[in-house]
Amino acid sequence: MWFKCLKIIIPTVLMNVSMILCAQKGEIQGVVLGNEVPIPFVNLYLKGTEIGTASDTDGNFNLPNLDPGNYTLKATAMGYVPFAQKVNISENERVLLTISMLESSEQLDESVVTGTLKAVSRLESPVPVEVYSPTFLKRNPTPNIFEALQNVNGVRPQINCNVCNTGDIHINGLEGPYTLVLIDGMPIVSGLGTVYGLSGIPNSLIKQIEIVKGPASSLYGSEAVGGLINIITKSAQETPEFFADSFLTGWGEYNLDLGSKLELNKNTDVLLGINYFNFKFPIDQNGDNFTDLTLQDRISIFQKWNVQRKDNRIFSLALRYFYEDRWGGETNWTQEYRGTDEIYGESIFTRRWEVLGQYQLPTTENIMFSFSFNTHNQNSVYGTTSYLAQQTIGFGQWTWDRSFDRHDMLFGAALRYNFYDDNTPATAELGINRPDRVLIPSLFVQDEWQIRDKNTLLVGVRLDRDKRHGLIFTPRAALKWKFSDNDILRFNVGSGFRVVNLFTEEHAALTGAREIIVAEALKPERSVNFNLNFLKKIFSDNGTYIGWDASAFYTRFSNAILPDYDTDPNSIVYDNLDGKSISQGFSTNVDLMLGNGLKVMMGATYQDVSTSEAGVKRRQILTEKFSGTWSISYDIRALDLSLDYTGNLYGPMRLPLLGPADPRREYSPVWSIQNIQLTYKGLPDIELYGGIKNFLDWTPNRGNPFIIARANDPFDKEVIFNANGNALATPNNPYALTFDPTYVYAPNQGIRGFLGLRYRLN
């Protein structure tokens, strides 16, 4: 009897105890998001316990049967900042969480190729490489990469002409020709393309932009003296099925980006990107009868083929076609006045074809063949001065990557062919047209030596043969000290060599009324430079990340070739500097990311760029003493909104005046361009965005009587000259000026609104 009762009572008691214990357990459920998109396969665990799980394909996760108490929930995923949050679990409580993880693509452990010609972790690279993702580009939407770089610390897009608005990129105060622009590691943009190469690259196909500030000549040749910009395009795995991004500004600028991918078969896919930009409304807000912004009609088509091969060997081929029709000048100019002296206009027709690719040999050794080819045709008229030019550049390069113990060696051989012809004296001899044909073979070797686990030494040398100058030797060295995973010091030193192509690089040689004087046979420039960089990373348990880096840089040029605007106000004199030219300074960046959705990027640069000749030191023209950039983003999750505030600040620059009587400022004031944007992400696959650009309404005509000298007489028909060719002061010309549009340091565009839409189909 008792035995039968116990058989009934004991299971009942155990079941009730179990139910009581289970009822006392807690639970954590939630979803993991990144940019409002679910993140699958995120590792989640409770710190100090063995309890953990992973999110499913929709980002959902569940941690059941938790004892009441205080926990720290941690989440980690490749490409995202580690997340941590304290959670209190009570009896019978189910805690619901939405975890928003922040992308680490700009701050942490990206793969970079620019510094060493090999894909390595950014933290492990002995060369400091800055990386900017498409997310960075979206914070201030622009129709081209040239404008987008205005928010990169130490990098400034410089407009070189008030009329046609062409420009180049300054890095740490060095002129545009010292910067090499690459697409997928290939030197596709140079010579004639330097002015236009950063326009028309579809943003929808950009994976990241890598920037090296400092010497890279031993790997990339003589054009990479001051730094380089490498635009990395996406692979098929990173590209959506279809992507569209379009925006319109209050000035009437219209930009359209389209991207898609097509799978031809199981081993071959094709990426297609199209960029179209149009601006067709002559606007003259400063009242000088000249367009404030050049009118443009531009299309660029980019196609990239990727072939999957055995053992994941690489084979890719990309093609790009670029066409642009741009003009600026007097607002009543039309094509019928092109090349005449009735109404002034600068009209440029540009056509470019580009091909680039990579092929990895089917061998056990890692041998790669890379190649590029481009042809550039330019038909331009600056007032009555025509400039007709054609350039063809072919490039091929073999690299062999081989490791020996602690040495990672890279051997390379390259061949570059450059054909250039125009209608200027640059390609004429005794009245006979003689196009410039240059063939430059190169050899280089690089050794990345892992001295110890935390110390790396990189040594590289390059030997080029240029028929004009013989053998050119450019060494390079870089040393990295890794004190910890979060503290890294890098030191880079190298030399550079550059041959100046005057008419392809110096737009001022073609525009305006100044006479161009080449005072001597120009010798190639040589330089010695170094860069010291320190990187510090700080992580906190609540998901906060702080990154700080600081750099000191120094470059000294001999035989520097800089335009002299000062000796003769009616001329631009080019000759080799009989002295030294120095660029030196300090820059720092701070990145902050908080778990509540706030992201801050701030940077500042101080630089001293000057020339010294005959004991006289002068600041380089159109170069700021200091600059700053910032980007502040905040996600308002409850409203599906994100807010972006971007801006820059530039210190005074010395400006090109036309003589002591010129009433314009000799130095620019401190100036800033700031933008604000709101993005709505509450619709499936669609983002709506809009905002205000240059909301301070800053333009360079503030504080100046005029920007373009003699805008009322662009052909100098009413200017009286003396016997030496100098302009004389007259009642009609009280300041003794000639027509000159080169007094430019900032965009003439004032405040304007913009609206846009992004659509993504996965």
Image (cartoon, rainbow, N blue to C red):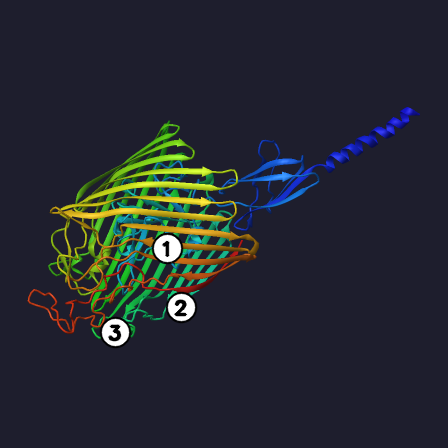
- Across and down, in percent, residue 105 comes to 45, 45
Mark 1 or mark 3, earlier in chain: 1
Label 1 or label 2, whichever lies nearer to me, is 2
Of discs 1 and 3, which sits in the foreground?
1
Mark 1, other Cα within 10 Å: few <14 / some 14–19 / many ≥20 = many
Q: Quadrant of the N terminus?
A: top right
Residue 221, percent across and down?
A: 26, 44
* In the image, residue 524 above or below residue 11: below
Name the amino acid, label 1.
Ile
Residue at numbered disc 2 = 252
Task: Report the Cα–Cα distance between label 1 and label 2.
Answer: 19 Å
**Is residue 151 visible in this depiction of the protein?**
yes
Residue 134 shows in this picture: no
Q: Secondary structure at mark 3?
A: helix
Please say if the residues under marks 2 and 3 sit with CB atoms less than 8 Å apart: no
Q: Are marks 1 and 2 in contact (CB under 8 Å)?
A: no
Residue type indicated by callout 3: Tyr
Tell me if mark 3 has few (under 14), some (14-19) or many (20+) residues whose alpha carbon lies within 10 angstroms of its own: some
- Disc 1 secondary structure class: helix
- Relative vertical location of residue 329 with respect to residue 394 in this rendering, above or below: below
Q: Which residue is mark 3?
A: 337
Side of 638 where 11 appears, left or right:
right
Q: Closest to the observer: 182 or 126?
A: 126
Earlier sequence position, callout 2 versus callout 3: 2
- Between residues 716 and 93, which one lies in front from this camera angle? 93
Separation of marks 1 and 3 at Cα, in angstroms: 32 Å
User: Of the residues shown, which amino acid type is indicated by label 2?
Assistant: Gly
How far across and how far down the image is residue 377, in percent? 28, 60
Residue 145, numbered label: 1
Crowdedness near tag 2: few (<14), some (14–19) or many (≥20) residues, C-alpha within 10 Å: some
Name the foreground residue: 324 vs 715: 715
- The quarter of the picture where residue 674 lies is bottom left
